[in-house]
Image (cartoon, rainbow, N blue to C red):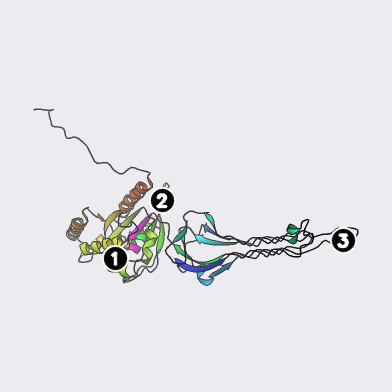
Amino acid sequence: MKFLDQAKIYIRSGNGGAGAVSFRREKFIPNGGPDGGDGGNGGNVWITAADGLNTLIDFRYQQHFKAATGTHGMGRQMHGAKGEDIILKVPVGTQVLDDDKETVLLDMDYVGKTEMLLKGGNGGWGNVHFKGPSNQAPAYANPGQEGQERWIWLRLKLIADVGLAGLPNAGKSTFLAAASAARPKIADYPFTTLVPNLGVVDLSPTERFVIADIPGLIEGASEGAGLGTRFLGHVERSGCLIHLVDGTQDDVAGAYRTIRHELEAYGAGLAEKAEVLALNKVDALTPEAREEKAAELEAVAGRRPMLVSGVSGEGVTELLRAAWTEVRKDRGEIAPAEEDETVMETPGGWEP
């Protein structure tokens, strides 16, 4: 199925049905009078976050959604039926934006969340409502109220606990395949990944989380270079980022700085998220090269990177557990590690 993460659609609620103009005419009833019924209300437009969806592809082939008009009123004070509602089913994590593509109207952030987008028009009153001592035979009724209409944008932000960041060919897709049952496309050329991929990581029966692999960033992505930062929104909700650096390239420090710069330029709090740094593809490095590359990364990042290989599986579990710990901290399930305040004791006891 093709991945689509944004769509512009037109929605319109139903018009209210018109009230009826009718007069009672029955044998042996000399005083008839008005008996026109009310029109039914127009249908509403709803949106709901449905389970099992992960793309907005359905909105590529249909962009116009209109609720039904209410049924008109009839004689004998018979009211018209309400117009049928229309319900838009979207993936969890979908945001509803105004036509300006900036104002967020709704955030469908959990399964089953249902909100009304547009309310249908009210049905018109029949002429029975207008009878009175001075007007015993009103020959008019109210028309139904017009429905509402507007253009909106739907923008999907995938719900993932951990996001993978790195340059093209950093080995993110290979790592995702090694860490989960996902089978993303893997090849030896840049930008193999063109759309985000999701994988479910099972560390144990009680330790499960979702990891997202987004297309690689390049220098200038925040200004539109390459695939730009279009897909970075899919890791905005993540608890932490796994930053993979290709250990086989010459300038690992420069690669790290490039990604960090693009994350800061994008904003939305990505640069402040917890980050687990890893030197990838270490299966292709000698022990001396591993130490040299790790030292370069440590010098620029200020912390020791983990050594992993998506091909051989080395260090994958340890890296996933480190990421899972950061996710639990973000959820508030565990407190941040406190500083070790162990007091060093002098052998033999205290002496002045």
Q: Which residues are magenta?
A: 157-173
Q: Position of residue 129 (x, y in %)?
A: 73, 57
Identity, as a three-letter code, of the amino acid under mark 2:
Arg
Q: Give the main secondary structure of the magenta stretch.
A: loop
Q: Is residue 182 visible?
A: no
Residue 167 counted in the magenta span: yes
Locate the C terminus and report the quarter of the image it occupies: top left
Residue at x 64% of width, y 60% of height? 122
Question: Left or right: 82 with respect to 212?
Answer: right
Residue 155 counted in the magenta span: no
The residue indicated by pointer 3 is 26
Instruction: Say which element carries label 1.
Output: loop
Instruction: Say which element carries label 3.
Output: loop
Question: Left or right: 251 with respect to 8?
Answer: left
Query: Looking at the image, is mark 3 or mark 2 earlier in the sequence?
Result: 3
Q: Position of residue 54 (x, y in %)?
A: 47, 62
The residue indicated by pointer 1 is 167
Query: Looking at the image, is mark 1 or mark 3 earlier in the sequence?
Result: 3
The residue indicated by pointer 2 is 208
